[in-house]
């Protein structure tokens, strides 16, 4: 997630300062991306660390982070993902707490709340606040 959350800021820059032909499309893209991001947070406020390429074969959790995020290279060996549930090539959601991802989520959702239209701006602010409170609670 830490590589994709920053795209919200780039799209926000386009929607605020970019060529008029692209401003509305940038907002639409932010809304589309946030449909994903807003599913990557628990009710308690913990932001999921990442979505990997697949289950690790023989490596422990800490050592395999880089491998599992490259499907087809060293993950489960599959060259593509077809988004068909329960067919054996599902992506793995890493639900561990990662303070970098947690606080990036807060930053980019708070920024998006200043750019987007309602109700999207309200959703961003509520989730940024929830994620911030969770981060404070775990230190």
Image: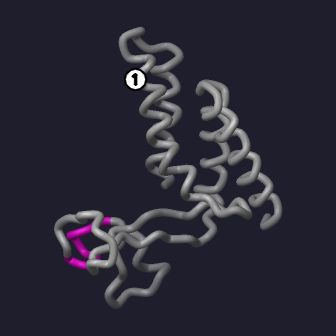
Residue at 36% x, 70% y: name it.
91
Can residue 111 be seen here? The reply is: yes
Q: Is residue 79 left or right of residue 116?
A: left
Q: Is residue 72 magenta?
A: yes
Residue at 41% x, 9% y: name it.
20
Q: Residues within 10 Å of mark 1 (few under 14, many from 20)?
A: some
Kindly indicate the quadrant of the structure image that contains residue 133. bottom right
Residue at 52% x, 32% y: name it.
9
Kindly indicate the quadrant of the structure image that contains residue 65. bottom left
The magenta stretch is: 70-77
Q: Please, what is the dominant secondary structure of the magenta stretch?
A: loop
Name the residue carrying label 1: 25
Give above or below for 105 relative to 98. above
Q: Where is residue 125 shown, x and y percent of the image?
A: 71, 39
Q: Quadrant of the C terminus?
A: bottom right
In the image, farthest residue toward the bottom = 58
Can residue 67 be seen here? The reply is: no
Depth order, front residue of 45/102: 45
At numbered mark 1, what does the secondary structure look like: helix, strand or loop? helix
């Amino acid at each position: 997630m830490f590589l994709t959350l920053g795209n919200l800021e780039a799209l926000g820059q386009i929607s605020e300062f970019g060529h008029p032909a692209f401003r509305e499309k940038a907002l639409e893209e932010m809304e589309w991306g946030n449909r994903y991001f807003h599913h990557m947070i628990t009710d308690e406020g913990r932001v999921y660390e990442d979505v990997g390429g697949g289950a690790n074969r023989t490596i422990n959790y800490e050592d395999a982070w880089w491998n599992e995020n490259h499907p087809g290279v060293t993950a489960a060996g599959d060259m593509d993902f077809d988004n068909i549930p329960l067919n054996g090539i599902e992506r793995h959601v890493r639900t561990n707490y990662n303070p970098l991802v947690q606080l990036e989520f807060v930053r980019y959702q708070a920024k998006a709340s200043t750019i987007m239209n309602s109700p999207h701006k309200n959703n961003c602010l509520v989730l940024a606040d929830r994620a911030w409170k969770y981060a404070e609670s775990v230190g």
